[in-house]
Image (spheres, rainbow, N blue to C red):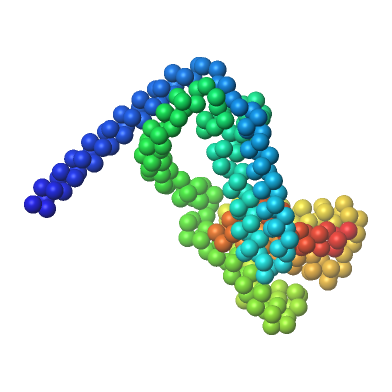
């Protein structure tokens, strides 16, 4: 009995899938047939929506900027992400495109062909999961291939990411224990982890360490300032700290974009301090 019900359920699923595919094809055909028609957009509505959303984004960014210090990092991150998410909504994207005299991709703020776009949307949405599944299946080996091409295995990539976090945590522990920056950099555990991290970086991107050293020397030459060994050590330690902090912000814990990393108050403080040392 259970087997018969299972077979019937399977038949229904197949039938339903076929129906969805048929609807998707019909919707896309309808949308394509209206593609040649001039799209009449509501520019005033688009402008109003964008202005109102920009006010919300600015308010969130101001709130994030007010949450300074490492203790408020999580709250600051949430506010920044909330602001960023408002810029990626279909409505905001369409409003921005319309104000640039471009056609809306998602059918918002349209006057005439909106009906055709609306009819096509449910079918396109129904077809999207299947397309996404195909893309996922086709691209599931891409990360492995990219890592192999870069000269670093998936296990080594995982180790490299882990080392960056471990170094940050260890340095924090040592700093809280009263050690100075110079003492921390000479700590056996730190030096061992940094050596392994640099080894993996060099394997991933041959010549990157030498390029970084050359860039540092060139920067010193341009500044015209001869640093003492102590100053060079301090600059080196700060550069390493900035690099590790940048990696952490870009990593899975925060997932910051380059723009968000540059706007991070702690990153700005460390970058300013580095520039002051290099003057």
Q: Quadrant of the C terminus?
A: bottom right
Q: Does 119 sit left or right of 164 as displayed?
A: left
Q: Position of residue 160 (x, y in %)?
A: 56, 62
Q: Is residue 142 left or right of residue 249?
A: left
Q: Residue at x 45, y 30 (%)?
A: 118
Furthest residue in direction bottom, as rendered = 177
Specify the quadrant of the image occupied by residue 269. bottom right
Residue in view at x 55 percent, y 17 percent:
38
Q: Nearer the viewer, residue 267 or 75?
A: 75
**Residue 212 visible here:** no
So how many labels did they put on this image? Answer: 0
Instruction: Say left or right for 65 vs 252.
Output: right
Residue drawn at point x = 78 percent, y = 56 percent: 216
Does residue 269 appear left or right of residue 77 in this picture? right
Q: Is residue 121 above or below residue 266?
A: above
Residue at screen point 79% across, 69% down: 233
Query: Looking at the picture, how far across and down is residue 243, in whole percent?
Result: 68, 60
- Residue 235 visible in this rendered orientation of the protein: yes
Image height of 21 relative to 261, above or below = above
Q: Nearer the viewer, residue 6 or 149?
A: 6
- Residue reaching furthest to the left: 1
Residue 234 pos. (x, y %): 79, 69
Q: Quadrant of residue 166?
A: bottom right
Residue 227 x %, y %: 87, 64
Identify whether 243 is placed above or below 183.
above
Q: Is residue 178 above or below residue 268?
A: below
């Amino acid at each position: 009995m259970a087997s018969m019900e299972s077979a019937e359920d399977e038949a229904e699923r197949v039938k339903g899938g076929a129906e969805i595919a048929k609807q998707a094809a019909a919707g896309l055909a309808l949308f394509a047939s209206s593609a040649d028609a001039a799209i009449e957009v509501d520019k005033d509505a688009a402008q109003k929506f964008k202005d109102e959303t920009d006010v919300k984004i600015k308010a969130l960014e101001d709130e994030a900027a007010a949450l300074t210090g490492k203790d408020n990092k999580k709250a600051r991150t949430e506010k920044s992400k909330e602001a960023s998410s408002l810029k990626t909504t279909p409505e905001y994207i369409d409003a921005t495109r319309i104000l640039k005299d471009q056609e809306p991709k998602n059918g918002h703020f349209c006057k005439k062909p909106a009906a055709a776009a609306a009819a096509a949307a449910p079918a396109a949405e129904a077809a999207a999961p299947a397309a996404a599944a195909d893309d996922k299946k086709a691209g599931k080996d891409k990360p492995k291939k990219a890592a192999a091409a870069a000269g670093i295995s998936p296990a080594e990539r995982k180790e490299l990411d882990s080392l960056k976090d471990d170094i940050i945590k260890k340095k924090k522990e040592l700093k809280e224990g009263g050690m100075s920056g110079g003492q921390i950099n000479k700590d056996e555990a730190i030096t061992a982890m940094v050596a392994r991290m640099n080894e993996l970086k060099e394997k991933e991107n041959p010549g990157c360490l030498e390029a970084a050293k050359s860039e540092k020397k060139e920067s010193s030459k341009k500044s015209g300032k001869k640093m003492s060994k102590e100053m060079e050590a301090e600059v080196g330690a700060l550069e390493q700290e900035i690099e590790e902090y940048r990696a952490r912000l870009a990593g899975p814990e925060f997932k910051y974009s380059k723009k968000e990393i540059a706007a991070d108050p702690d990153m700005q403080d460390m970058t300013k301090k580095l520039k002051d040392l290099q003057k």
